[in-house]
Image: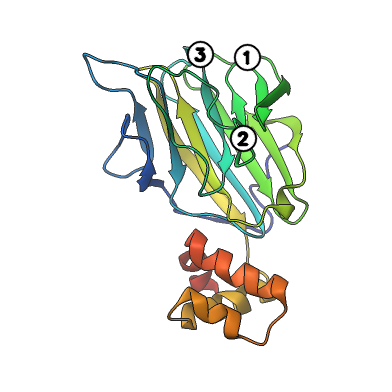
Amino acid sequence: MKPPLLQGFVEETWTWSSDGLSSDTELSPCRRDVYFHTDPVLESCGTAGVRGSTGFVQGEHYWEVEFLEPASGYSVMVGVGTSKAALHAGSYEYINLLGKDTESWGLSYKGMIWHRCSSRPYTEPFFDRGTVIGVHLNLKEGTLTFYKNRQCLGLAFTGLHKVQSPLYPMVSSTAPGIELSLGLRCSTLPTLEERCLSTLAHGLAKMDLVDLLPLPVAVRWKLKSLKEGSDLDALAPEL
């Protein structure tokens, strides 16, 4: 099963967020590469994470993360999380950061998937430099599926369409010297509903004005989520 790259998908240009990252990470100038625990003296003092610059509330999204260095240490993870998901665990706390609570979902390089501080076996461990992990977030179905080097690893999580908050791409690491790079990023073309919501959200000066609109509660929530997730620029060219 190949990843959803061709029919109905368009390229995206989001990057890692310069505002949503641990102090133990550094970004490249283009913000596609993230470097973990770069202090030459302290090295790793805990667990560091970073999230993407765009959060998703609807549609299908696929992106790839390449391991520029071999995975090592207690945990290196790829996944998704809300804006409340932890980005840092210090004081020499080495943990599986993505999935440590209800705010994130993650895949460890050791082959385990994590959510609610609970894990289960999912795939064989992957250690090699150059490994590419694909992430398919389907918010129509509420599913999260991972790929390894363009080969589907199977369904990992369900029920994500019930999360009432934008979901952001995330990565984390406990090990120093880990370098992860964003590759392909794409999504389905916005539907008519998504275009209308984007137009409304662009026209609102303040988020609290959403509650004054004579719209169903579910629609007002989507408007708020669009503004929170900064997903407007991705939809605007299609309007």
Q: Position of residue 82 (x, y in %)?
A: 56, 48
Q: CA distance from mark 1 to mark 3?
A: 13 Å
User: How many numbered circles does the render carry?
Assistant: 3
Please tell me which residue is depicted at 68% across the width and 74% down the height of the picture. 219
Label 2, on which residue? 101
Q: Is residue 227 left or right of residue 178?
A: right
Q: Amino acid at mark 3?
A: Tyr
Label 1, on which residue? 125
Please tell me which residue is depicted at 59% across the width and 72% down the height of the picture. 223
Q: Secondary structure at mark 1?
A: loop
Q: Secondary structure at mark 2?
A: loop
Decide which of tag 1 and tag 3 comes sooner along the chain. Answer: 3
Q: Amino acid at mark 1?
A: Pro
Label 3, on which residue? 74
Crowd band around label 1 with a 10 angstrom C-alpha radius: few (<14), some (14–19), many (20+): few
Q: CA distance from mark 2 to mark 3?
A: 18 Å
